[in-house]
Amino acid sequence: AQSVSQHNHHVILSEAASLELGCNYSYGGTVNLFWYVQYPGQHLQLLLKYFSGDPLVKGIKGFEAEFIKSKFSFNLRKPSVQWSDTAEYFCAVIGSSNTGKLIFGQGTTLQVKP
Amino acid sequence: DTAVSQTPKYLVTQMGNDKSIKCEQNLGHDTMYWYKQDSKKFLKIMFSYNNKELIINETVPNRFSPKSPDKAHLNLHINSLELGDSAVYFCASSQRLAGAVETQYFGPGTRLLVL
């Protein structure tokens, strides 16, 4: 069965620090990968997505993620975080044969200290 | 204009009651979803409708019944509410694309608290 694992449950950084959040998935076929962000009290917003092509994808607000097929990973990065990046981050996957069923990781809480 | 909207935003009710949550999208999408986010913030899909037809029905108690009167609306009715139903319920929508995977857009969530 498909699954998504986010290794960092709670990350605390100071402003301007670099960020990398891990995401690994388990699926035997072609996958499509997403990172969503949930700011406090708000809904999920799409940060970026990978469907095909260049494995390094750039999203909004300076975020990027790299798809490494051999490692079944899709880690999220940002070179310099801001206090406003404090949020919950979710990695998600849809297998190409699925009917739109997004499988989410358990989420990573990012706290950025000013 | 809100792309995916949900009402109510907050819902506090007693155990045993029946309640409904409404979702509407104005993106012209043909597929809608309900997700449940538990107290540990874990998100899990419950249902999905494509053009008013149920296409995903996860292991959810029969007390939960989705209804899609048209492509733009997907409501969730919950009978005999239990304490464990307390959660945030998110609606989402997407456009089904032949041979491609669509992006899902989420609503603001409905915070349900069962007392």
Image (cartoon, coloured by chain):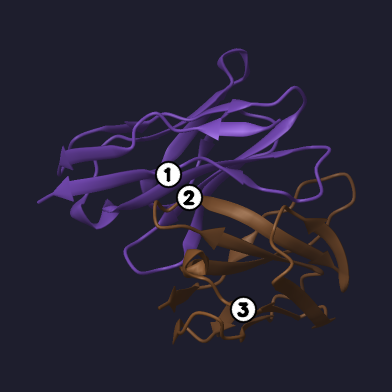
Chain colours: A purple, B brown
Q: Please give left or right for residue A2 compared with residue A105 in the image.
A: right
Q: CA distance from mark 1 to mark 2?
A: 7 Å
Q: Quadrant of residue A93?
A: top right
Marks counted in the figure total 3
Q: Which residue is mark 1?
A: A107
Mark 2 or mark 3: which comes first in sequence?
2
Q: Are marks 1 and 3 on the same chain?
A: no
Classify the position of the N terminus of chain A by image quarter.
top right
Q: Which residue is mark 3?
A: B80
Q: Which residue is mark 2?
A: B42
Q: As displayed, is residue B47 above or below residue A77?
A: below
Mark 2 element type: loop
- Which residue sits at x=53%, y=71%? B82
Looking at the image, which is closer to me, B108 or A57? B108
Mark 3 element type: loop
Q: Are marks 1 and 2 on the same chain?
A: no
Looking at the image, which is closer to me, B13 or B30? B13
